[in-house]
Amino acid sequence: MQRIIDAARATPKGAKKDTAAAMPKGYCPPAVEAAWYDWWESSGFFKPDMDSGKPSFVIVIPPPNVTGTLHLGHALTNAIQDTIVRWRRMSGYNTLWVPGTDHAGIATQTVVEKKLQRERGISRHDLGRERFLEEVYKWVDEYGGRICGQLRRIGSSVDWDRQVFTMDGSRSEAVLEAFVRMYDQGKIYRDNRLVNWCCTLKTAVSDIEVDYIDVPTRTLMSVPGYKDPVEFGVLQSFAYPLADGAEGEVVVATTRIETMLGDTAVAIHPDDARYAHLHGKHVVHPVNGRKIPIVCDAELVDMSFGTGCVKITPAHDPNDFATGKRHGLEFINVFDDDGRINANGGPFEGQRRFEARRTVTEFLKEKGLFRGTEPNPMRLGLCSRSKDVIEPMLKPQWWVDCKQMAADGCAAVRDGRMKILPKEFEATWFRWLENIRDWCVSRQLWWGHRIPAYYCQLDGDASLPGTTTEDMSRWVVGRSPEEARRRAEEKFPGREVTLLQDEDVLDTWFSSGLFPFSVFCWPNNTADLAKFFPTSLLETGHDILFFWVARMVMMSMALTGEVPFKEVYLHSMVRDAHGRKMSKSLGNVIDPIHVIEGISLEGLHETLEGGNLDQKEIKRAREGQKADFPDGIEECGTDALRFALCSYTSQARDINLDIKRVVAYRHWCNKLWNAIKFAMLNLDEAFSPKLPAELPVAELSAPCRWIISRLNAAVRATAEAMEGYDFSGATTAIYSFWQYEVCDVFIELMKPVMARGSEAEKDATRNALWLCLDRGLRLLHPFMPFVTEELWQRLPQPRGAPAPPSVMLAEYPAPADGWDAPALEADMAYALDVVGKVRGLRADYNLAAKQRPQLFIACSDPRRRAVLAGLAGEVATLGSCSAAECLAEGAAAPASCGVKICDEATTVYLLLQGVLDPKLELGKLEKKKADIEGKREALAKKMAMPSYAEKTPAKMKEADQSTLEKLAAELSAAEAAMEGFRNMIA
């Protein structure tokens, strides 16, 4: 086999593989997949024709992050996309699929920082911004190329000449233009608002980068940077004394008692009679002695919850922030960027936030103000990158006003300019966009598009952005420092201006939101932009419908006036065979190359060592790998992986991927291989297939007419499924045609024809076979590009008609007029049911393949009898019988026959005289019967014991009952067979 692989790989890069040699004995994925992709690419098959009059079909790849290698989720996305693109290309469209990668700001920076710390013991701050970015670009060069290699292995037919990177020159120009335009339109503004703050990474993070976990009760959890676990899931109560010498107190409760340092009010419900006397009053803050107001707020306060009093920390809680805005409260931030208490925390300054949780509690106890602790279920947000607890923090940041853009996005779906499929996701779309909040686009990172905003220091003053001295009216934006200076001079005429560019970078989703048009070099009016935008389809996972899809739609409509794509198709999420989310620490994240090439368990273990997992996570992941893949992963090949992934898309919102299913499709590829190999033995060099239009279908034999009709049905079912993006339905239709109709039936039926038929019969059968193979491979090609190209290239082509150079350029099959034979299909379906009963009868008597008894068929229905008589030869062939005879009405079958009833009208008989020794078989069955009876009696005795009903688990009872029923069925079958042999002896 290695010789075959080496020979295939010896094909010069970009040259067409030689398929003239004899076919290898079996299907070998490495040999089959070698050379084809390079030939497709070098031949320009992936490129669109700029002068074509064909309708365009355009998609852009959801750009994978340059943070490592692709996983099976990416493989699913690309398998579906490539299937669609190849199908559209074969269906007469001028196709373009644009590849690219995403710089993935926070993800990439985090990975590179961990790498530097692990390998060199340094941080980015030790290197400085410029040298750190050099390290990131090294990472991008290494992993960006690795990702492109994986896309090639998966067979993605992208136009590599149009490959982009979200940080390349043209995309960076688009980002600058978009920011400046949206700022000038009033859609981007600067404000001091709450963000999701990661204290470990010291940056704001997007909502998608926050993982929420439910904490049902008092729980100790590890938090990055803390030696001891931190307690969550508790509600702590404390009292605020009334101010101005009034007697009494107000008791409040919180899950984050350290934030009380920033409390600026206590809220009560205006209708709560218990606190009517407190309207307009104040309480005293026990730490700093400030008087803070008691405010009435019906929107925030639930009178029935707790004491009905709520502490208000506007700078550290979203609900409190809104309350603070409503009541004009003071906003006091008590944390530094790393999560330590700042000067606003008074005596607690310098303490880390969860240390302050303990010391503030002790302080309140000492003051006699602590009122107790009780378990409290809560939802905790964790940074997906660092696993640190997210802290809501008040920060001056850049924001996008999304309200009008979101309304435009809703209108585009409602008026049909853009479709969302499956349609059920429309409700999610409307729910998110109708409740949208403004989008924070500032990130406190070094890796990414630096924000093109400049702070103006005037006349040498010392005000600084991001500090309490910042004046938000001092900002200008510009596509370049020169443009920013011109704008500053216009804004502050006659003033001495010093420009300070914002140190922050833009959220990665900002550049990703421009992707459908930035790939065509917007804002420049390029030929690509004019011809290929808006695109035809976006295909991606449903998990980023809001985070990416909505932002692309909003930004496209705001900047180009167009929806970015006409349709959105959302696929399911890939989970492991147990339904668990793919996680590196679980060891269930699978590189598609490991499925394609196979990998040992030891090899899987080695992949963990090269990542960023700590030793504890590596140990857990190794255990997970050993449990799921004790023998490693078998070599499956690209085609089997793609077909399996597409076949899984019938599942609802999650795909529980079992590698065993991929392995099964790899074996099915071998079935295809053998079918073509058999065909090549019968399609000799002298054979020239007829064009389909020249084939006299109506004059062909019943098997030939039947298989062509079934081909037409498969073509129709596949076309309908593909139009509806029902890839599971398409794979089922194609698989069923090849497996159950071509291989299991037609190839078996043609064997006697090719052995004993006339030349005319042989020629007609060859043409029917060729038609099925040619059209069947075309149907299958979008899903299995490599094996179909390898096999299709070996098929002879009609003379006198130019053949396309590749199956990927061949016309995708469409239903043909005159090929449907519904009556014949119904007749064959009935005959195949009878064949199934014949095979069952053979199994009853344990007949070997070489034992071919004569078959007799008795049928009381004249119509069915005529059908079976006409197809008797086919029934005999498929039932492995020497011959088949339909008995005349009322005629009896010969003695010494095995019997099986098919239905109310039909019974089949196998003549076993001379095939089996009835006495010998009867003796075997008597022993078998005794063995079955012994097992049944023992089990029945066990189940009848008094203790069985009381002590036996329900699952064991169910299993025992199932075994009992199975033994009864086996006993009945044995007795029936014995009766048959007794009749033969008599």
Image (cartoon, helix red, strand yellow):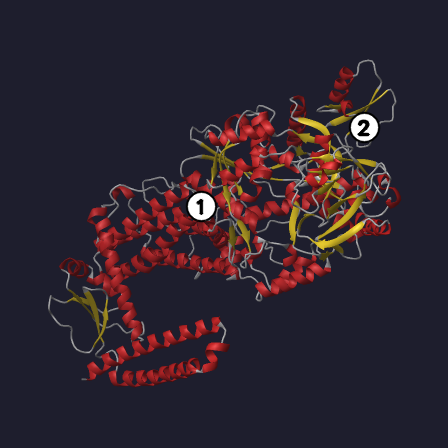
Under tag 2, what secondary structure?
Answer: loop
Q: Quadrant of residue 946?
A: bottom left
In the rendered view, would you say 887 is above or below 23? Answer: below
Marks 2 and 1, how far apart in space?
57 Å
Closer to us: 407 or 81: 407
Q: Amino acid at mark 1?
A: Pro
In the rendered view, would you say 120 is above or below 752? Answer: above
The numbered mark, 2 or 1, whose residue comes first in the sequence reads 2
- Give the tally of numbered discs: 2
Under tag 1, what secondary structure?
Answer: loop
Residue plotted at (14% across, 67% down)? 887
Closer to us: 522 or 381: 381
State the image coordinates of residue 534 (x, y, percent, origin top left).
51, 29
Residue at label 2? 470
Q: Is residue 516 visible?
A: no
Residue at label 1? 782
Q: Quadrant of residue 163?
A: top right
Give the foreground label among 2 and 1.
2
State the image coordinates of residue 705 (x, y, percent, origin top left).
24, 51
